[in-house]
Amino acid sequence: MASYDNQNLLAGGRTNGNISVVSGSSRGGGGNSNVEAEKSPFLEKSEPVRLTPAWEENNLPNDELNFKGLTMERAKMQVNPPRDKMMLVFIVLMIHGIGTLMPWNMFITAKSYFVEYKLSENYTGNANGSDYGTYFLSSLGFAAQIPNLIFNWLNIFVNLGGNLTKRIVLSIMVEVIAFIVTVILAMMNSSEWPGAFFWITMTTVVILNMASGIYQNSVYGMAAKLPFKYTGAVVLGSNVSGTFTSIILLLSSEFSSSVRTAAIYYFITAMFFLLLCFDTYFALPLNKYYRYHELMKEKEMETNQRMNPSQRPPYGTIFKQAFPQLFNVFFVFFVTLSIFPAVHSDVKRVDTDFLVPEKHFASICCFLTFNLCAMLGSLATSWVQWPKPKYLVWPVVLRVVFLPLFLFCNYQPLNITRVLPVYIDNDWVFWGLGIVMSFSSGYLSSLGMMYAPQSVEPRYAMTAGMFAAAMLITGIFTGLLFTRLCPMFVQHNFLDWLN
Protein backbone atom coordinates (compact mmCIF):
# COMPACT_ATOMS: atom_id res chain seq x y z
CA MET A 1 0.00 0.00 0.00
CA ALA A 2 1.72 3.14 -1.17
CA SER A 3 0.83 6.75 -0.42
CA TYR A 4 2.01 10.09 -1.86
CA ASP A 5 4.05 12.37 0.40
CA ASN A 6 1.35 15.06 0.59
CA GLN A 7 3.58 17.58 2.26
CA ASN A 8 6.18 17.45 -0.51
CA LEU A 9 3.53 17.42 -3.21
CA LEU A 10 1.70 20.47 -1.86
CA ALA A 11 4.94 22.30 -1.47
CA GLY A 12 5.79 21.48 -5.04
CA GLY A 13 9.12 20.02 -3.87
CA ARG A 14 10.98 17.06 -5.34
CA THR A 15 14.29 15.24 -4.90
CA ASN A 16 16.10 14.83 -8.17
CA GLY A 17 12.79 15.11 -9.97
CA ASN A 18 11.38 12.02 -8.28
CA ILE A 19 8.14 11.70 -6.36
CA SER A 20 8.94 10.16 -3.02
CA VAL A 21 6.93 7.01 -2.26
CA VAL A 22 6.93 5.43 1.17
CA SER A 23 6.32 1.72 1.41
CA GLY A 24 4.02 0.25 3.94
CA SER A 25 6.97 -1.41 5.73
CA SER A 26 8.56 1.92 6.53
CA ARG A 27 5.70 2.64 8.88
CA GLY A 28 6.75 -0.31 10.88
CA GLY A 29 10.29 0.99 11.15
CA GLY A 30 11.72 -0.92 8.20
CA GLY A 31 14.11 0.55 5.59
CA ASN A 32 12.89 3.24 3.15
CA SER A 33 12.50 2.40 -0.47
CA ASN A 34 12.45 5.16 -3.17
CA VAL A 35 10.53 4.38 -6.31
CA GLU A 36 11.54 6.61 -9.18
CA ALA A 37 8.49 7.93 -11.00
CA GLU A 38 8.26 9.53 -14.38
CA LYS A 39 8.87 13.26 -14.44
CA SER A 40 5.67 15.32 -14.64
CA PRO A 41 5.61 18.67 -16.39
CA PHE A 42 3.05 19.91 -13.90
CA LEU A 43 5.63 19.68 -11.13
CA GLU A 44 8.31 21.73 -12.85
CA LYS A 45 7.11 24.95 -11.24
CA SER A 46 8.20 25.96 -7.79
CA GLU A 47 4.67 27.10 -6.96
CA PRO A 48 1.93 24.71 -5.85
CA VAL A 49 -0.58 23.49 -8.35
CA ARG A 50 -3.97 25.03 -7.59
CA LEU A 51 -7.40 24.65 -9.13
CA THR A 52 -9.10 28.07 -9.18
CA PRO A 53 -12.42 29.25 -10.58
CA ALA A 54 -12.24 31.30 -13.79
CA TRP A 55 -13.61 34.40 -12.06
CA GLU A 56 -10.84 34.33 -9.44
CA GLU A 57 -7.97 33.79 -11.83
CA ASN A 58 -6.06 37.06 -12.38
CA ASN A 59 -9.09 38.91 -10.99
CA LEU A 60 -10.77 39.12 -14.42
CA PRO A 61 -13.07 42.13 -14.83
CA ASN A 62 -16.71 41.68 -15.82
CA ASP A 63 -16.23 42.59 -19.47
CA GLU A 64 -13.64 39.83 -19.93
CA LEU A 65 -15.94 37.41 -18.14
CA ASN A 66 -18.72 38.37 -20.56
CA PHE A 67 -16.35 37.85 -23.46
CA LYS A 68 -15.49 34.36 -22.13
CA GLY A 69 -19.19 33.60 -21.80
CA LEU A 70 -19.78 34.86 -25.34
CA THR A 71 -16.95 32.69 -26.63
CA MET A 72 -18.39 29.64 -24.85
CA GLU A 73 -21.79 30.37 -26.37
CA ARG A 74 -20.24 30.63 -29.84
CA ALA A 75 -18.43 27.34 -29.39
CA LYS A 76 -21.58 25.63 -28.19
CA MET A 77 -23.61 27.01 -31.10
CA GLN A 78 -20.98 25.95 -33.65
CA VAL A 79 -21.30 22.38 -32.44
CA ASN A 80 -25.11 22.44 -32.40
CA PRO A 81 -26.33 25.24 -34.71
CA PRO A 82 -29.95 26.16 -33.91
CA ARG A 83 -32.89 26.12 -36.31
CA ASP A 84 -35.39 28.83 -37.09
CA LYS A 85 -38.27 27.26 -35.20
CA MET A 86 -41.70 28.10 -36.59
CA MET A 87 -39.89 30.43 -39.04
CA LEU A 88 -40.06 33.23 -36.48
CA VAL A 89 -37.01 35.10 -37.82
CA PHE A 90 -38.35 34.78 -41.38
CA ILE A 91 -41.72 36.21 -40.28
CA VAL A 92 -40.10 39.08 -38.36
CA LEU A 93 -38.02 40.09 -41.39
CA MET A 94 -41.13 39.88 -43.57
CA ILE A 95 -42.86 42.25 -41.10
CA HIS A 96 -39.96 44.68 -41.48
CA GLY A 97 -40.23 44.32 -45.27
CA ILE A 98 -43.86 45.44 -45.00
CA GLY A 99 -42.77 48.34 -42.81
CA THR A 100 -40.10 49.56 -45.23
CA LEU A 101 -42.58 50.34 -48.02
CA MET A 102 -45.55 51.18 -45.79
CA PRO A 103 -45.11 55.00 -45.94
CA TRP A 104 -45.14 54.96 -49.75
CA ASN A 105 -48.05 52.53 -50.02
CA MET A 106 -50.14 54.26 -47.32
CA PHE A 107 -50.13 57.61 -49.12
CA ILE A 108 -50.53 56.20 -52.63
CA THR A 109 -53.44 53.94 -51.62
CA ALA A 110 -55.19 56.84 -49.83
CA LYS A 111 -55.61 58.72 -53.11
CA SER A 112 -59.36 59.12 -52.60
CA TYR A 113 -58.87 60.71 -49.17
CA PHE A 114 -56.42 63.34 -50.41
CA VAL A 115 -57.69 64.01 -53.96
CA GLU A 116 -61.43 63.39 -53.65
CA TYR A 117 -61.91 64.69 -50.10
CA LYS A 118 -59.31 67.00 -48.51
CA LEU A 119 -58.26 68.74 -51.74
CA SER A 120 -61.57 68.53 -53.62
CA GLU A 121 -63.65 71.53 -54.64
CA ASN A 122 -66.61 70.23 -52.62
CA TYR A 123 -64.56 70.26 -49.40
CA THR A 124 -62.58 73.47 -49.92
CA GLY A 125 -65.39 75.40 -51.60
CA ASN A 126 -63.12 76.84 -54.29
CA ALA A 127 -61.46 75.68 -57.48
CA ASN A 128 -57.95 76.47 -56.17
CA GLY A 129 -58.20 73.58 -53.75
CA SER A 130 -58.93 71.13 -56.57
CA ASP A 131 -55.81 72.33 -58.40
CA TYR A 132 -53.71 70.93 -55.58
CA GLY A 133 -55.59 67.66 -55.95
CA THR A 134 -54.79 67.51 -59.67
CA TYR A 135 -51.04 67.53 -59.03
CA PHE A 136 -51.13 65.62 -55.75
CA LEU A 137 -50.06 62.16 -56.99
CA SER A 138 -47.24 63.38 -59.22
CA SER A 139 -45.96 65.66 -56.44
CA LEU A 140 -46.26 62.82 -53.96
CA GLY A 141 -44.11 60.58 -56.14
CA PHE A 142 -41.23 63.06 -56.24
CA ALA A 143 -41.60 64.07 -52.58
CA ALA A 144 -41.42 60.41 -51.57
CA GLN A 145 -38.83 58.93 -53.89
CA ILE A 146 -36.21 61.69 -54.13
CA PRO A 147 -35.36 61.75 -50.38
CA ASN A 148 -35.73 57.97 -50.25
CA LEU A 149 -33.25 57.64 -53.11
CA ILE A 150 -30.75 60.13 -51.66
CA PHE A 151 -30.74 58.71 -48.14
CA ASN A 152 -30.61 55.10 -49.34
CA TRP A 153 -27.36 55.82 -51.16
CA LEU A 154 -26.00 58.13 -48.47
CA ASN A 155 -26.60 55.51 -45.77
CA ILE A 156 -24.13 53.16 -47.50
CA PHE A 157 -21.16 55.50 -47.25
CA VAL A 158 -22.04 57.60 -44.19
CA ASN A 159 -23.00 56.06 -40.86
CA LEU A 160 -26.23 58.03 -40.47
CA GLY A 161 -27.64 57.77 -36.96
CA GLY A 162 -24.92 55.50 -35.54
CA ASN A 163 -24.89 51.72 -35.59
CA LEU A 164 -27.50 49.46 -37.15
CA THR A 165 -29.74 49.46 -34.07
CA LYS A 166 -29.78 53.24 -33.75
CA ARG A 167 -30.49 53.69 -37.45
CA ILE A 168 -33.46 51.32 -37.42
CA VAL A 169 -34.90 52.56 -34.11
CA LEU A 170 -34.56 56.29 -34.92
CA SER A 171 -35.98 55.79 -38.41
CA ILE A 172 -39.06 54.00 -37.09
CA MET A 173 -39.65 56.65 -34.43
CA VAL A 174 -39.43 59.47 -37.00
CA GLU A 175 -41.94 57.62 -39.19
CA VAL A 176 -44.32 57.20 -36.24
CA ILE A 177 -44.12 60.94 -35.47
CA ALA A 178 -44.80 61.75 -39.15
CA PHE A 179 -47.92 59.56 -39.10
CA ILE A 180 -49.06 61.29 -35.88
CA VAL A 181 -48.89 64.62 -37.74
CA THR A 182 -50.88 63.06 -40.60
CA VAL A 183 -53.58 61.85 -38.19
CA ILE A 184 -53.80 65.31 -36.59
CA LEU A 185 -54.25 66.86 -40.06
CA ALA A 186 -57.03 64.35 -40.76
CA MET A 187 -58.80 65.42 -37.54
CA MET A 188 -58.58 69.14 -38.35
CA ASN A 189 -60.84 71.10 -40.68
CA SER A 190 -58.47 72.25 -43.43
CA SER A 191 -61.10 73.46 -45.88
CA GLU A 192 -59.99 77.09 -45.55
CA TRP A 193 -56.27 76.41 -46.05
CA PRO A 194 -55.89 73.73 -48.75
CA GLY A 195 -52.53 75.15 -49.86
CA ALA A 196 -51.08 74.90 -46.36
CA PHE A 197 -52.51 71.38 -45.99
CA PHE A 198 -50.89 70.37 -49.30
CA TRP A 199 -47.43 71.68 -48.40
CA ILE A 200 -47.52 70.37 -44.82
CA THR A 201 -48.43 66.95 -46.22
CA MET A 202 -45.61 67.10 -48.76
CA THR A 203 -43.13 68.13 -46.05
CA THR A 204 -44.33 65.20 -43.93
CA VAL A 205 -43.86 62.86 -46.90
CA VAL A 206 -40.31 64.13 -47.45
CA ILE A 207 -39.35 63.58 -43.79
CA LEU A 208 -41.14 60.24 -43.75
CA ASN A 209 -39.22 58.96 -46.76
CA MET A 210 -35.87 60.29 -45.54
CA ALA A 211 -36.35 58.05 -42.50
CA SER A 212 -37.75 55.26 -44.68
CA GLY A 213 -34.65 55.33 -46.90
CA ILE A 214 -32.36 54.76 -43.91
CA TYR A 215 -34.71 52.17 -42.44
CA GLN A 216 -35.07 50.18 -45.65
CA ASN A 217 -31.34 50.20 -46.36
CA SER A 218 -30.53 49.12 -42.78
CA VAL A 219 -33.08 46.27 -42.83
CA TYR A 220 -31.47 44.78 -45.94
CA GLY A 221 -28.08 45.13 -44.25
CA MET A 222 -29.48 43.28 -41.22
CA ALA A 223 -30.94 40.51 -43.39
CA ALA A 224 -27.56 40.06 -45.12
CA LYS A 225 -26.20 38.61 -41.85
CA LEU A 226 -28.48 35.61 -42.31
CA PRO A 227 -28.79 32.95 -45.03
CA PHE A 228 -29.85 34.47 -48.33
CA LYS A 229 -33.49 33.36 -48.13
CA TYR A 230 -34.00 35.89 -45.34
CA THR A 231 -33.26 38.73 -47.74
CA GLY A 232 -36.06 37.20 -49.79
CA ALA A 233 -38.28 37.52 -46.70
CA VAL A 234 -37.74 41.31 -46.71
CA VAL A 235 -38.57 41.49 -50.43
CA LEU A 236 -41.64 39.32 -49.80
CA GLY A 237 -42.74 41.76 -47.11
CA SER A 238 -42.25 44.67 -49.52
CA ASN A 239 -44.58 42.98 -51.99
CA VAL A 240 -47.09 42.12 -49.27
CA SER A 241 -47.10 45.77 -48.18
CA GLY A 242 -49.31 46.90 -51.07
CA THR A 243 -51.91 44.20 -50.42
CA PHE A 244 -51.78 44.88 -46.70
CA THR A 245 -52.41 48.62 -47.05
CA SER A 246 -55.23 47.99 -49.55
CA ILE A 247 -56.95 45.69 -47.05
CA ILE A 248 -56.51 48.26 -44.25
CA LEU A 249 -58.08 50.97 -46.44
CA LEU A 250 -60.98 48.69 -47.38
CA LEU A 251 -61.70 47.73 -43.76
CA SER A 252 -61.38 51.29 -42.43
CA SER A 253 -63.76 52.52 -45.13
CA GLU A 254 -66.21 49.69 -44.51
CA PHE A 255 -66.49 50.20 -40.75
CA SER A 256 -66.35 54.01 -40.65
CA SER A 257 -69.15 56.49 -40.99
CA SER A 258 -67.17 59.08 -42.95
CA VAL A 259 -64.08 59.53 -45.09
CA ARG A 260 -62.45 61.55 -42.29
CA THR A 261 -62.95 58.80 -39.69
CA ALA A 262 -61.75 56.14 -42.14
CA ALA A 263 -58.56 58.13 -42.77
CA ILE A 264 -57.91 58.46 -39.02
CA TYR A 265 -58.27 54.70 -38.50
CA TYR A 266 -56.19 54.04 -41.61
CA PHE A 267 -53.17 56.11 -40.54
CA ILE A 268 -53.39 55.02 -36.89
CA THR A 269 -53.10 51.42 -38.09
CA ALA A 270 -49.84 52.35 -39.83
CA MET A 271 -48.52 53.78 -36.56
CA PHE A 272 -49.31 50.59 -34.66
CA PHE A 273 -47.70 48.46 -37.36
CA LEU A 274 -44.49 50.50 -37.20
CA LEU A 275 -44.48 50.05 -33.42
CA LEU A 276 -44.79 46.31 -34.09
CA CYS A 277 -41.65 46.58 -36.24
CA PHE A 278 -39.99 48.41 -33.34
CA ASP A 279 -40.85 45.66 -30.85
CA THR A 280 -39.94 42.75 -33.10
CA TYR A 281 -36.53 44.24 -33.82
CA PHE A 282 -35.64 44.10 -30.12
CA ALA A 283 -37.11 40.61 -29.88
CA LEU A 284 -34.75 39.25 -32.55
CA PRO A 285 -31.66 38.95 -30.27
CA LEU A 286 -33.71 36.71 -27.97
CA ASN A 287 -34.00 34.17 -30.78
CA LYS A 288 -31.23 31.54 -30.76
CA TYR A 289 -31.16 31.23 -34.53
CA TYR A 290 -30.71 34.97 -35.07
CA ARG A 291 -28.19 35.22 -32.24
CA TYR A 292 -26.16 32.37 -33.72
CA HIS A 293 -25.73 34.11 -37.08
CA GLU A 294 -25.16 37.48 -35.41
CA LEU A 295 -22.38 36.01 -33.25
CA MET A 296 -20.80 34.36 -36.27
CA LYS A 297 -20.90 37.69 -38.13
CA GLU A 298 -19.41 39.50 -35.12
CA LYS A 299 -16.63 36.94 -34.90
CA GLU A 300 -15.87 37.43 -38.58
CA MET A 301 -15.85 41.22 -38.19
CA GLU A 302 -13.58 41.00 -35.14
CA THR A 303 -11.11 38.94 -37.14
CA ASN A 304 -11.21 41.42 -40.02
CA GLN A 305 -10.73 44.37 -37.66
CA ARG A 306 -7.66 42.75 -36.12
CA MET A 307 -6.21 42.22 -39.58
CA ASN A 308 -7.29 45.63 -40.91
CA PRO A 309 -8.08 47.82 -37.89
CA SER A 310 -8.93 51.07 -39.73
CA GLN A 311 -9.77 49.93 -43.22
CA ARG A 312 -13.08 51.06 -44.76
CA PRO A 313 -15.01 48.62 -46.95
CA PRO A 314 -13.73 48.70 -50.54
CA TYR A 315 -16.96 50.12 -51.96
CA GLY A 316 -15.72 50.13 -55.55
CA THR A 317 -14.71 46.48 -55.42
CA ILE A 318 -17.95 45.45 -53.70
CA PHE A 319 -20.06 47.32 -56.26
CA LYS A 320 -18.10 45.80 -59.15
CA GLN A 321 -18.40 42.24 -57.83
CA ALA A 322 -22.11 42.60 -57.06
CA PHE A 323 -22.93 44.66 -60.17
CA PRO A 324 -24.62 41.84 -62.18
CA GLN A 325 -27.14 41.29 -59.38
CA LEU A 326 -27.44 45.02 -58.69
CA PHE A 327 -28.35 45.55 -62.34
CA ASN A 328 -30.92 42.75 -62.11
CA VAL A 329 -32.56 44.38 -59.10
CA PHE A 330 -32.56 47.80 -60.77
CA PHE A 331 -33.96 46.61 -64.10
CA VAL A 332 -36.73 44.48 -62.60
CA PHE A 333 -38.07 47.47 -60.68
CA PHE A 334 -37.53 49.88 -63.56
CA VAL A 335 -39.72 47.78 -65.88
CA THR A 336 -42.30 47.11 -63.17
CA LEU A 337 -42.69 50.74 -62.07
CA SER A 338 -42.77 51.91 -65.71
CA ILE A 339 -45.98 49.88 -66.02
CA PHE A 340 -47.50 49.75 -62.55
CA PRO A 341 -49.53 51.58 -61.46
CA ALA A 342 -49.67 54.41 -64.03
CA VAL A 343 -50.13 52.41 -67.27
CA HIS A 344 -51.60 49.28 -65.70
CA SER A 345 -54.42 51.11 -63.90
CA ASP A 346 -55.37 53.20 -66.97
CA VAL A 347 -56.11 50.16 -69.15
CA LYS A 348 -59.87 50.14 -69.70
CA ARG A 349 -62.18 47.17 -70.16
CA VAL A 350 -62.99 46.25 -73.80
CA ASP A 351 -65.64 43.54 -73.47
CA THR A 352 -68.81 44.78 -71.74
CA ASP A 353 -69.66 41.17 -70.78
CA PHE A 354 -66.30 40.53 -69.13
CA LEU A 355 -66.28 38.69 -65.81
CA VAL A 356 -65.08 41.75 -63.83
CA PRO A 357 -67.44 44.75 -63.96
CA GLU A 358 -66.20 48.15 -65.08
CA LYS A 359 -66.53 49.57 -61.55
CA HIS A 360 -64.00 47.11 -60.10
CA PHE A 361 -61.91 46.47 -63.22
CA ALA A 362 -58.86 48.52 -62.16
CA SER A 363 -59.13 47.48 -58.49
CA ILE A 364 -59.17 43.76 -59.29
CA CYS A 365 -57.29 43.38 -62.58
CA CYS A 366 -54.60 45.91 -61.66
CA PHE A 367 -54.02 46.58 -57.95
CA LEU A 368 -55.21 43.33 -56.41
CA THR A 369 -53.69 41.21 -59.18
CA PHE A 370 -50.31 42.93 -58.98
CA ASN A 371 -49.97 42.89 -55.20
CA LEU A 372 -51.16 39.30 -54.84
CA CYS A 373 -49.06 37.85 -57.68
CA ALA A 374 -45.92 39.80 -56.70
CA MET A 375 -46.33 38.44 -53.18
CA LEU A 376 -46.67 34.87 -54.49
CA GLY A 377 -43.62 35.37 -56.72
CA SER A 378 -41.51 36.46 -53.75
CA LEU A 379 -42.80 33.59 -51.65
CA ALA A 380 -41.88 31.07 -54.37
CA THR A 381 -38.18 31.86 -53.95
CA SER A 382 -38.30 30.19 -50.53
CA TRP A 383 -38.53 26.83 -52.32
CA VAL A 384 -37.16 27.44 -55.82
CA GLN A 385 -34.06 29.46 -56.78
CA TRP A 386 -33.84 29.27 -60.57
CA PRO A 387 -32.10 30.46 -62.64
CA LYS A 388 -28.74 30.59 -60.90
CA PRO A 389 -26.96 33.95 -60.43
CA LYS A 390 -24.99 33.73 -63.68
CA TYR A 391 -28.11 33.37 -65.84
CA LEU A 392 -30.60 35.55 -63.94
CA VAL A 393 -29.92 38.50 -66.24
CA TRP A 394 -31.66 36.81 -69.21
CA PRO A 395 -35.23 36.63 -67.85
CA VAL A 396 -34.70 40.05 -66.25
CA VAL A 397 -33.80 41.69 -69.59
CA LEU A 398 -36.56 39.82 -71.44
CA ARG A 399 -39.15 41.49 -69.20
CA VAL A 400 -38.66 44.69 -71.19
CA VAL A 401 -41.18 43.21 -73.66
CA PHE A 402 -43.94 44.07 -71.15
CA LEU A 403 -43.50 47.79 -71.91
CA PRO A 404 -44.83 47.71 -75.49
CA LEU A 405 -47.31 44.92 -74.70
CA PHE A 406 -49.15 47.00 -72.09
CA LEU A 407 -49.14 50.00 -74.42
CA PHE A 408 -50.78 47.78 -77.07
CA CYS A 409 -53.64 47.09 -74.63
CA ASN A 410 -56.59 49.47 -74.25
CA TYR A 411 -54.48 52.01 -72.37
CA GLN A 412 -56.40 55.28 -72.12
CA PRO A 413 -54.41 57.93 -70.19
CA LEU A 414 -56.38 60.79 -68.67
CA ASN A 415 -56.97 63.80 -70.95
CA ILE A 416 -55.04 62.15 -73.81
CA THR A 417 -56.43 61.16 -77.22
CA ARG A 418 -55.02 57.78 -78.17
CA VAL A 419 -53.63 57.51 -81.71
CA LEU A 420 -51.83 54.17 -81.42
CA PRO A 421 -54.18 51.32 -82.43
CA VAL A 422 -55.26 48.85 -79.74
CA TYR A 423 -53.61 45.59 -80.78
CA ILE A 424 -54.53 43.58 -77.64
CA ASP A 425 -58.30 43.95 -77.29
CA ASN A 426 -58.96 40.84 -75.22
CA ASP A 427 -59.46 41.48 -71.48
CA TRP A 428 -58.39 37.95 -70.57
CA VAL A 429 -55.08 38.42 -72.39
CA PHE A 430 -54.54 41.73 -70.59
CA TRP A 431 -55.28 40.10 -67.22
CA GLY A 432 -52.90 37.25 -68.06
CA LEU A 433 -50.14 39.74 -68.94
CA GLY A 434 -50.72 41.42 -65.59
CA ILE A 435 -50.39 38.12 -63.74
CA VAL A 436 -47.14 37.13 -65.51
CA MET A 437 -45.64 40.62 -65.14
CA SER A 438 -46.52 40.78 -61.43
CA PHE A 439 -45.36 37.26 -60.55
CA SER A 440 -42.08 37.68 -62.45
CA SER A 441 -41.50 41.01 -60.71
CA GLY A 442 -41.80 39.49 -57.26
CA TYR A 443 -39.85 36.34 -58.13
CA LEU A 444 -36.93 37.86 -60.05
CA SER A 445 -36.50 40.84 -57.71
CA SER A 446 -36.33 38.47 -54.74
CA LEU A 447 -33.69 36.34 -56.46
CA GLY A 448 -31.61 39.42 -57.30
CA MET A 449 -31.79 40.70 -53.73
CA MET A 450 -30.87 37.26 -52.38
CA TYR A 451 -27.97 36.72 -54.79
CA ALA A 452 -26.38 40.17 -54.28
CA PRO A 453 -24.87 39.50 -50.80
CA GLN A 454 -23.62 36.11 -52.03
CA SER A 455 -21.63 37.65 -54.88
CA VAL A 456 -19.04 39.22 -52.54
CA GLU A 457 -16.88 38.02 -49.68
CA PRO A 458 -18.95 37.15 -46.58
CA ARG A 459 -17.50 40.06 -44.60
CA TYR A 460 -18.88 42.49 -47.21
CA ALA A 461 -22.31 40.87 -47.50
CA MET A 462 -23.98 43.62 -45.46
CA THR A 463 -22.61 46.38 -47.69
CA ALA A 464 -23.68 44.47 -50.82
CA GLY A 465 -27.18 44.11 -49.34
CA MET A 466 -27.31 47.86 -48.78
CA PHE A 467 -26.18 48.49 -52.37
CA ALA A 468 -28.99 46.22 -53.57
CA ALA A 469 -31.56 48.16 -51.53
CA ALA A 470 -30.30 51.43 -53.03
CA MET A 471 -30.54 49.99 -56.56
CA LEU A 472 -34.10 48.88 -55.78
CA ILE A 473 -35.11 52.45 -54.96
CA THR A 474 -33.19 53.73 -58.00
CA GLY A 475 -35.19 51.35 -60.20
CA ILE A 476 -38.46 52.56 -58.66
CA PHE A 477 -37.52 56.21 -59.15
CA THR A 478 -36.40 55.89 -62.77
CA GLY A 479 -39.45 53.74 -63.55
CA LEU A 480 -41.73 56.48 -62.20
CA LEU A 481 -39.91 59.02 -64.36
CA PHE A 482 -40.35 56.83 -67.45
CA THR A 483 -44.13 56.64 -66.95
CA ARG A 484 -44.33 60.31 -67.93
CA LEU A 485 -43.29 59.30 -71.46
CA CYS A 486 -45.90 56.55 -71.86
CA PRO A 487 -48.82 58.87 -72.78
CA MET A 488 -46.63 60.35 -75.53
CA PHE A 489 -46.08 56.89 -77.04
CA VAL A 490 -49.81 56.28 -77.59
CA GLN A 491 -50.62 59.90 -78.40
CA HIS A 492 -48.17 60.00 -81.32
CA ASN A 493 -48.02 56.28 -82.26
CA PHE A 494 -44.44 55.39 -81.33
CA LEU A 495 -44.40 52.66 -84.02
CA ASP A 496 -44.12 55.43 -86.59
CA TRP A 497 -40.91 56.59 -84.93
CA LEU A 498 -39.43 53.13 -85.38
CA ASN A 499 -40.12 53.30 -89.08
Image: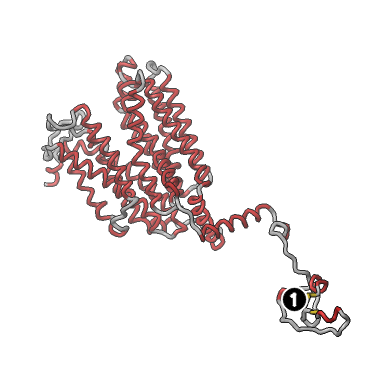
Q: Nearer the viewer, residue 107 or 475?
A: 107
* Direction from residue 79 to residue 448 in the image, left or right: left
Amino acid type indicated by mark 1: Glu
Disc tally is 1
| Left or right: 1 in relation to 280 | right
Residue under the image location 41 percent in, 38 percent down: 99
Q: Coloured how? A: secondary structure
x and y percent of residue 128 in the render?
32, 19
Q: List x then y, in percent, for residue 186.
A: 41, 22
| Quarter of the figure with the N terminus | bottom right
Instruction: Determine if residue 417 is in view.
Output: yes
Splitting the image into 4 quarters, where does residue 207 fall? top left
Farthest top residue in view = 125
Residue ranking furthest to the right: 29
Left or right: where 26 falls relative to 402: right
Pointer 1 local density, CA inside 10 Å: few below 14, some 14–19, many at least 20: few
Residue 135 in percent (x, y) is at 30, 28
Q: Would you place residue 470 above or below residue 44 in this image? A: above
Report whether 454 appears left or right of 393. right
Location of residue 132 in the rendering, given as x and y in whole percent from the top left corner: 32, 24
Identify the residue at image location x=45%, y=49%.
Answer: 85
Q: Is residue 139 visible?
A: no
Q: Assign a secondary structure to mark 1.
A: loop
**In this figure, which residue is indicated by the disc labeled 1?**
44
